[in-house]
Image (tube, rainbow, N blue to C red):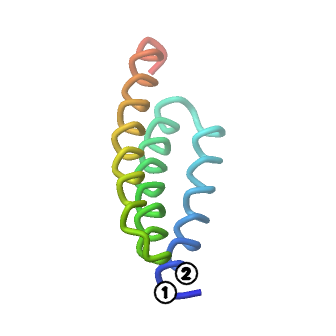
Amino acid sequence: MNEWELAALVLFAVLLLCMVLTAVLPLGSGLVALELSGTVGTAVLLLLAEGFNRPSFASLAIVFAFLSFVGALAFARLLERRL
């Protein structure tokens, strides 16, 4: 295990914490945790792409970053009256 994979493992633990907080916290704070989990998830994917020496996997991280942003906007739009 190299340093890239170790950093991805540490950030994966943070990602799990963000996902738990998204489910437990009220909607406003849960939306913030959802946005943070998208950012951390993108960083995990980029670190894994570098750790496995597969630069083509970085495109997956870029697509995930875009989709997590769009998903968070859709979540906020759907629940805007409750926020």
Distance from Cα at disc 1 to Cα at disc 2: 5 Å
**Quarter where residue 68 is shown:** top left
Instruction: Decide: is 74 above or below 56.
Output: above
How many numbered marks have been drawn onto this rendered protein structure? Answer: 2
Q: In this image, 20 relative to 78: left or right?
A: right
The quadrant the N terminus occupies is bottom right
Q: Which mark is residue 3?
A: 1
Looking at numbered disc 1 in the image, what kind of residue is underneath it?
A: Glu
Q: Which residue is mark 2?
A: 6
In the rendering, at what x and y percent does residue 49 appear? 44, 68
In the rendering, at what x and y percent does residue 82 appear? 48, 16
What secondary structure is marked by label 1? helix
What secondary structure is marked by label 2? helix
Residue pushed farthest bottom?
A: 2
Residue at the (40%, 36%) spot, across then down: 67
In the rendering, at what x and y percent does residue 6 appear? 55, 81
In the rendering, at what x and y percent does residue 25 appear? 59, 38
